[in-house]
Image (cartoon, rainbow, N blue to C red):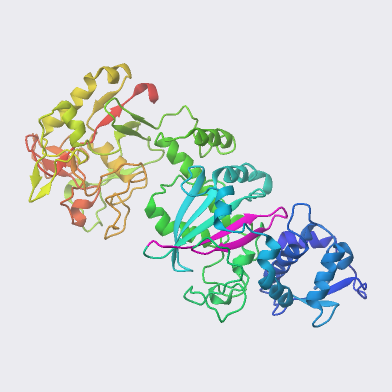
Amino acid sequence: MRSRILAGLALLLIPTQAAPPSWMHVTIEGRSAENSTYLEASFFYQLQTLVGTEASSPKVLDSAIVRRQRKELYIDLNAVAPAKAALLRNIAGKTSPVNITLGEIAAYMDRHYYELTRPYPNLKALLAKHPYRDNPNWLTVPVDSATFHHRRVLHIQKDRIADALMSYFDNKLRLIYPQGTVIAADSFDPKGNFIETEVLRKRGDTFWNFAVYDRDGALIRTSIAFDERGEVAHDLPGFHVPGSCANCHRIDRLDFSGDPQPPISAPVPGFFHRLPAHTPEIHLGPEYYDHKAFRELTEATSRQKDGVFGVYGSLFLSELVIRKRLGKFTVDDRARYQRLLPDYSDLLEALDHVDSFTNSIGVQFIRIPAPVQRVMIGSLDADPEHRPDEQRHPLRYRGTFFLDMRQVTNAEFRRFRPTHRSGSYQGKVLDGDDQPVANLNYDDAQAFVAWLNQLPKERAAGRIYRLPNEEEWEYAAQGGDGRRFAWGDEWPPPGSAKQFPNPFFLYGLTGSTREWTGSIYGPYPEGLASEAPNGSTLRVVRGSSWADESQKTLRIAYRIPTPPEERSPFVGLRVAADVPSLH
């Protein structure tokens, strides 16, 4: 913001002389070298709100309304409408009609903020105009609010994000959201009860208006103060956030930023974020939202504004990538993807590139991409759970293939063998239709694969099914980032580890069943020490089951030598597919 403010005022610098009678001096209390630009931003925002918020209103930053003599700021009352000039004189009248303070402006704003910004009268009216709840055309971002101790769900219309992304490079790597953009944040207490909705709406003058609606949907027409725990503090005046950062909450709705660090230590550092030139492809499951999204929304990373909302561009592009990979595009998704593809070809592939398919019995397969750099598999000698048969070595497979997103289920296997029963184990039922098939030996797994290969629709599509070899399995389970466990590198596993996919969208790598591979157990790789005797017919089983709890068995690198005739309640299968026409 500093650069834009200074650029806007540079043309209005006036040599030091007596100020004309029409100029009103502006006093900014508590001003210092560290917070000067930040407090000036507060002044510009509030002055713009006072002179008008419509697109046709004079732009404070781009007009002759504000004048500067050295470090002093003045408002040229002749440059605003007579009624607005009278309002400013009235606000300043208690002290001096030729001097107005930022505190006086802020006090007036606290009393008249909603009257001046004209928000929707209630939440029902907002939803009628902007139906953001349960709407696939709105991006939904659940976050935990460390500031206000609430669960929050943020919403922004996808087409508005696409508009901002399209103008990103034309605005010096800034996301500038168009007029009328709405960002809504629904807050919930720890029990899931709705508390309130905070709403940001982009004005015609490029600033953002702020409104709050209570649990009944009524507009809260007074400013709210919060204490250090994020609770409403009725004895504190004005609209503040914890840490005495009086301007953070309002100023961070501008199109341009203040200094990366606020003048006083804020409860959450910054709020400044810019969309990076190259947004990584990331999985956006609930574990991402819980642990990363709120931090990304609030860290200081840039001086550019609307930058506080730049993360929405990152999330939106990532969501498009993910929906394409999973074959879940709506018509609207496809239109947005085509619109953004020319400008973001480093992130978005061509639409005719097939990342997933569903076969004739309803099994969904995901493309496992060929490694783009040297990939190591096996475990490190320094791993406390390292075993002699897990020697670390470069991945030898270099191609691409498709892999079942989940283990084969009982229902799917019974399409091939209707009499199969996975049974139970120590009271745990394993035979539900949606549960992964278990109690299969190696020949059972291969027989299922052979049956798939003979299905007429699969043959016509040119799909060739097989069991993955163990190097393919390990690379796919790593998800492209060399992780130690399916969920990451940390121990113990998060509570959600069993429910969410790895970065390649493979489910059930932990807490489901182990899986047969097509590999014979032996040295890993060839020529290194192994526990297996020469001539072994043991097969390699990979992964961990619902019965595994130790670090050793939950590691991706763990290899399980298994007699091919063995049937176990802990072992099932996942199928690989080669589709030459899609490579």
Q: Quadrant of the N terminus?
A: bottom right
Residue 198 in magenta? yes
Q: Is residue 482 above or below residue 348?
A: below
Q: Residue at x 36, y 64 (%)?
A: 191
Q: Residue at x 54, y 44 (%)?
A: 158
Q: Nearer the viewer, residue 144 or 223?
A: 223
* Image coordinates for residue 462, horizontal then vertical, percent: 32, 19
With 371 as the anchor, is 271 left or right in this view? right
Q: Quadrant of the C terminus?
A: top left
Span colored in magenta: 192-215
Q: Is residue 223 visible?
A: yes
Residue 498 in magenta? no
* Image coordinates for residue 21, horizontal then vertical, percent: 92, 73
* Image coordinates for residue 382, horizontal then vertical, percent: 26, 57
* Image coordinates for residue 427, horizontal then vertical, percent: 8, 50
Q: Nearer the viewer, residue 65 or 81?
A: 81
Q: Please tell me whether the stretch drawn in magenta is mainly helix, strand or loop.
A: strand
Q: Toward which corner of the image does residue 466 lie, by quadrant?
A: top left
With 57 as the anchor, is 140 left or right in this view? left
Q: Is residue 282 above or below residue 75?
A: above
Q: Is residue 394 visible?
A: no
Q: Residue at x 14, y 43 (%)?
A: 430
Q: Toward which corner of the image does residue 491 lie, by quadrant?
A: bottom left
